[in-house]
Image (cartoon, coloured by chain):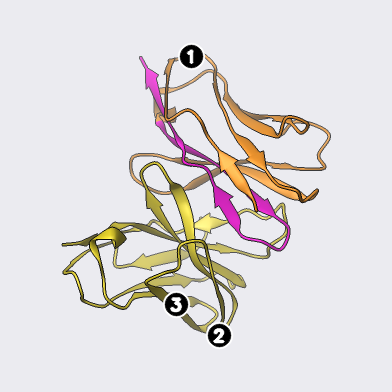
Chain colours: A orange, B yellow
């Protein structure tokens, strides 16, 4: 069975600094995808970034990058140059081929001015 | 933005009453999902559908049923609502179940059972 773990219930970061949100996963399947979603206070789920299990390079999307360490089964989200609008819940998720998407418990990020 | 509409957006209902939540998509995606979101648990899958009239249970399916009579509509029914079903419910869609396929979410339905 697939499992996603986010151990940080809440994180604080100063505006303009970088922050890392942790995510570890567990699966015996060699083919899977890892995803990060942002949920602002308005409640919608916004897709941020994707990493495939066979991808050689870490994924990047603007200020978001995914620090993928396959041997350690971790897929941490790095947000560079934090902005006040980055304050939100962040969810890590995993999908194994031909299976549904499973989510971690989430991390609430607060950006301080 | 993916065309996913959930209705209603907010609902308060009494214990023991039936409740149906609707998810409507305009993307013609084959796969549709119902999740519930609760503090400390993230999103947990209730039921999903892989085609018209094809559905299966997720990890927290007890007390819920679903139906999909058309590609675009996926209904979630609470036959007899309980207070433990107070939650935010999200519908999601995806084109396929490949490992690299993201899911697109509706805006959520906040359900309160009193």
- CA distance separating discs 1 and 2: 50 Å
Both marks 2 and 3 on one chain: yes
Residue B16 appears left or right of B40 = left
Q: Is residue A66 above or below residue A105?
A: above
Verify whether residue A96 appears in magenta.
yes
For label 2, the crowd category at 10 Å Cα-Cα, with few meaning under 14, some 14 to 19 and many 20 or more, is: some
Horizontal and vertical percent position of residue A16: 48, 14
Chain containing the residue with disc 1: A
Q: Which residue in the protein does label 3 denote?
A: B66
Tell me where residue B63 sits by quadrant: bottom left
Tell me where residue B40 sits by quadrant: top left
Verify whether residue A89 appears in magenta.
yes
Residue B25 appears left or right of B8 = right
Q: Which residue is drawn at the image coordinates 46% and 51% (left, top)?
A: B43
Q: Which mark is residue A16?
A: 1
Instruction: Please report the bounds of the magenta region as a residue range.
Output: A88-113
């Amino acid at each position: 069975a697939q499992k996603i773990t986010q151990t940080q219930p809440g994180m604080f970061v100063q505006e303009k600094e970088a922050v890392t949100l942790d995510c570890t996963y567990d699966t015996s399947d060699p083919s899977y995808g890892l995803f990060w979603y942002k949920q602002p206070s308005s409640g919608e789920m916004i897709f941020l970034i994707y990493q495939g299990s066979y991808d050689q390079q870490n994924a990047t999307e603007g200020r978001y990058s995914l620090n993928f360490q396959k041997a350690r089964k971790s897929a941490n989200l790095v947000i560079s140059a934090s902005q006040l609008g980055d304050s939100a819940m962040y969810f890590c998720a995993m999908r194994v081929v031909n299976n549904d998407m499973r989510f971690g418990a989430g991390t609430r990020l607060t950006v301080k001015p | 933005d993916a065309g996913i509409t959930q209705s209603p957006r907010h609902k308060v209902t009494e214990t023991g009453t039936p409740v149906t939540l609707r998810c409507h998509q305009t993307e013609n995606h084959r796969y549709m999902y119902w999740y519930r979101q609760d503090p400390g648990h993230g999103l947990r899958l209730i039921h999903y559908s892989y085609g018209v009239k094809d559905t299966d249970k997720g990890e927290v399916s007890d007390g819920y049923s679903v139906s999909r009579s058309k590609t675009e509509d996926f209904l979630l029914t609470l036959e007899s609502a309980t207070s433990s079903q107070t939650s935010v419910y999200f519908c999601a869609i995806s084109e396929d179940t490949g490992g690299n396929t993201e899911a697109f979410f509706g805006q959520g339905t906040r359900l309160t059972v009193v």
